[in-house]
Amino acid sequence: MVQLHVKHGDESQFLVDTTVDVSLETLTHQVAAMYNGILKVDRICSEIEELAEHGVTLPPNMQGLTDDQIVDLKLRDEWQDKCVPSGGAEFKKDEIGRRNGYAPNGRMKEVLKKTVEEAKALVSKKQVLAGVCVTMETVKEALDQLRGAVMIVYPMGLPPHDPIRMEFENQEDLAGTQASLQVIPEQEAQLWWAAKELQRGKKLQDYVGKNEKTKIVVKIQKRGQGAPAREPVVSTEEQKQMMLHYYRRQEELKKLEEADDDSHLQSEWSDRQALKRQFQGLTNIKWGPR
């Protein structure tokens, strides 16, 4: 199997096993789907952490308003009584006014947080260092775990405007958010290797040969962004280690120079011929008048 180390920019994303005979059209769609799926997992995890702390989101027309403003406008959250967490709620006001403040109790909160940790671990970028490949099934497993935990804590479901429910139903609206800049639509995705775009009309073997034991680094990005920047031959961390080694070597050489100081050889006590000259009366000889 060919192993792809997928990066976006200079940041590692995940490892993928494939074959040299795969069409690049299929491979590009597969990598883009996994990349976007992992982004979805991260977004949902972030929202579930907020859900555990402050409950479900308020209706859009109530978000960001103060209590007095809500009273003055005679607004009411009709979902507050419908979406009650299992075991009852514990009130913890959301200072930014995005969620209703009726959070799950301690036990249910722990269910959500533990599931978030497990889902993050499945698609973590640390899997690259561990040499573990990620598949679309892995991404789906992480999403299923998160969906199951939310159903346990909120058996009646979440409001239709809650971003977690919208993410699970693929109805999320990312317009105007930083997250929208990270997503790469599958039709606009491009894979690059060795400063070459992997053209969709070809197969992987057209670029890397027929060796199934090949390992390559590919970069994913949107069409129209041009070739990704070449990575430095020496990474930042390797450069730091080289500088540290050079500094330590310099310090060692300084100590050796100090230890090998031979200035004492000019002293009288170190003169091997001093005794001989003394017997010959050749000591304390000065030229010129006394």
Image (cartoon, rainbow, N blue to C red):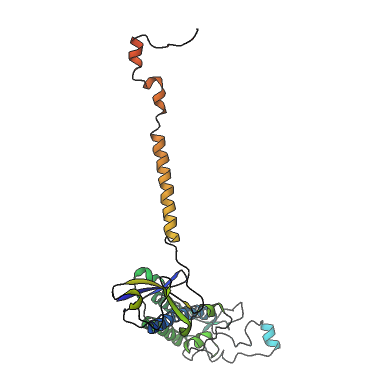
Q: Quadrant of residue 64?
A: bottom right
User: Horizontal and vertical percent for residue 23?
Assistant: 36, 83
The N terminus lies in quadrant: bottom left
Q: Measuring 42% from the left and 44% from the top, which residue is drawn there?
A: 250
Of the pair 190 and 154, the residue shown nearer to us? 190
* Front one among 34 and 217: 217
Q: Is residue 222 left or right of residue 126?
A: right
Q: Residue at x 41, y 35 (%)?
A: 258
Q: Position of residue 81 (x, y in %)?
A: 55, 91
As drawn, the residue found furthest toward the top would be: 290
Residue 274 in sight in this render: yes
Which residue is found at the position 40% from the left and 76% from the top? Answer: 123
Q: Is residue 142 visible?
A: no
| Quadrant in the picture for residue 137 | bottom left
Q: How many marks?
A: 0
Front-most of residues 260 and 45: 260
Residue 56 in the image, given as x and y percentages of width and height = 54, 85
- Look at the picture and state if 132 lies above or below 62: above
- x and y percentages locating residue 205 in the rendered image: 33, 78
